[in-house]
Image (spheres, rainbow, N blue to C red):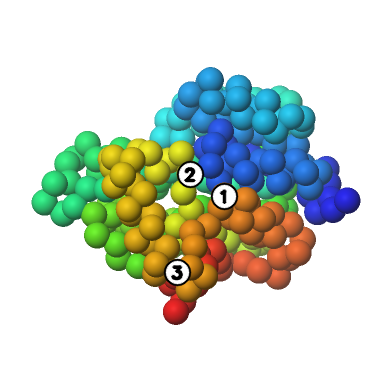
């Protein structure tokens, strides 16, 4: 049985569903102990049941700095270190230019940019030299999809962070990489502000633009995050790895 992450302690923010949950399952299967976060306790409890073992759930809002401090206090008390950080938590909705509100802007940037930055910065005392950081971005920062400008801007910031942080942490040999998923339907898609019929039309329309002819699955992103978190990618640093069926490249 593969154990690429044997003995590693990992944190996945936004780990109660979708890509985060799929990654937690993969990490545990590869031998890691995983901490997951989410805003809703019921979803966290269900995720723990799904993962089954070697997992601790901490209710936390990724945009709340006090919650982040409390999260790291739990990790420090229970495990004393953190080998892998997957900063995955994020929010987004379809709002076209002309309808963008200050509330929408602040909510999206507070979670996807401010929250991610401080999630990483506050983790540094727990990260040993040689640790791995993976940031979750998106193809939308490169694609320019309509009504996604605020969300896309946050993900462009995430990509920029990785470039700078790879150099900030070079003396500690901590690798910082980005995974950028393509169209991967998850429960978060239900928050886009679309009806069920509109959502299906959106997904089908995007699939037509993907060379593989289909959308992705959360586990396909999870397997990529395992690669970036493990020694298999020991000489990979500062990259943005697109997992999109070729949508951006072709």
Q: Which residue is mark 2?
A: 186
Q: In the structure shown, which secondary structural element does the residue marked by tag 1 occupy?
A: helix
Q: In the structure shown, which secondary structural element does the residue marked by tag 2 occupy?
A: loop
In which quarter of the view is residue 247 placed?
A: bottom left
Residue 197: mark: none
Whether residue 132 is visible, yes or no, is yes
In which quarter of the view is residue 122 placed?
A: top right
Q: In the structure shown, which secondary structural element does the residue marked by tag 3 occupy?
A: loop
Q: Which residue is mark 3?
A: 210
Q: Which residue is mark 1?
A: 218
Q: Residues within 10 Å of mark 2 (few under 14, many from 20)?
A: some
- The one of 224 and 62 positioned closer to us in this rendering: 224
Q: Of callouts 2 and 3, which one flags the residue occurring earlier in the amino acid sequence?
A: 2
Q: Residue 79 vs residue 98: left or right?
A: right
Q: Are marks 1 and 3 in contact (CB under 8 Å)?
A: no
- x, y percentage for residue 220? 61, 56
Q: CA distance from mark 1 to mark 3?
A: 16 Å
Whether residue 134 is visible, yes or no, is no
Q: Residue furthest front?
A: 197
Seen at 84% across and 53% down, the residue is 2
Q: CA distance from mark 1 to mark 2?
A: 7 Å
Q: Residue 165 vs residue 188: left or right?
A: right
- The one of 55 and 122 positioned closer to us in this rendering: 55
- x, y percentage for residue 63? 41, 35
- The one of 10 and 94 positioned closer to us in this rendering: 94
Q: Are marks 1 and 2 in contact (CB under 8 Å)?
A: yes
């Amino acid at each position: 049985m593969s154990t690429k992450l044997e003995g590693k302690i990992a944190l996945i923010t936004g780990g109660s569903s979708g890509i985060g949950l799929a990654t937690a399952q993969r990490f545990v299967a590869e031998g890691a102990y995983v901490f997951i976060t989410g805003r809703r306790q019921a979803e966290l409890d269900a995720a723990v049941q799904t993962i089954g073992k070697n997992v601790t759930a901490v209710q936390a809002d990724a945009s709340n700095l006090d919650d982040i401090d409390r999260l790291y206090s739990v990790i420090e008390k229970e495990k004393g270190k953190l080998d892998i950080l997957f900063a995955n938590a994020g929010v987004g909705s379809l709002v076209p230019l002309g309808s963008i509100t200050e509330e929408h802007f602040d909510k999206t940037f507070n979670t996807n940019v401010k929250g991610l930055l401080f999630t990483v910065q506050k983790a540094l005392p727990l990260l040993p030299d040689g640790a791995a950081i993976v940031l979750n971005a998106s193809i939308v920062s490169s694609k320019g999809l309509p009504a996604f400008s605020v969300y896309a801007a946050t993900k462009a910031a995430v990509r920029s962070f990785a470039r700078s942080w790879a150099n900030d942490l070079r003396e500690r040999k901590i690798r910082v990489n980005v995974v950028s998923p393509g169209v991967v339907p998850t429960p978060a898609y239900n928050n886009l502000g679309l009806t069920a019929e509109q959502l299906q039309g959106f997904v089908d329309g995007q699939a037509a633009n993907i060379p593989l002819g289909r959308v992705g699955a959360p586990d396909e992103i999870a397997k990529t995050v395992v690669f970036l978190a493990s020694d298999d990618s020991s000489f990979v640093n500062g990259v943005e790895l697109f997992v999109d069926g070729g949508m951006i490249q072709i």
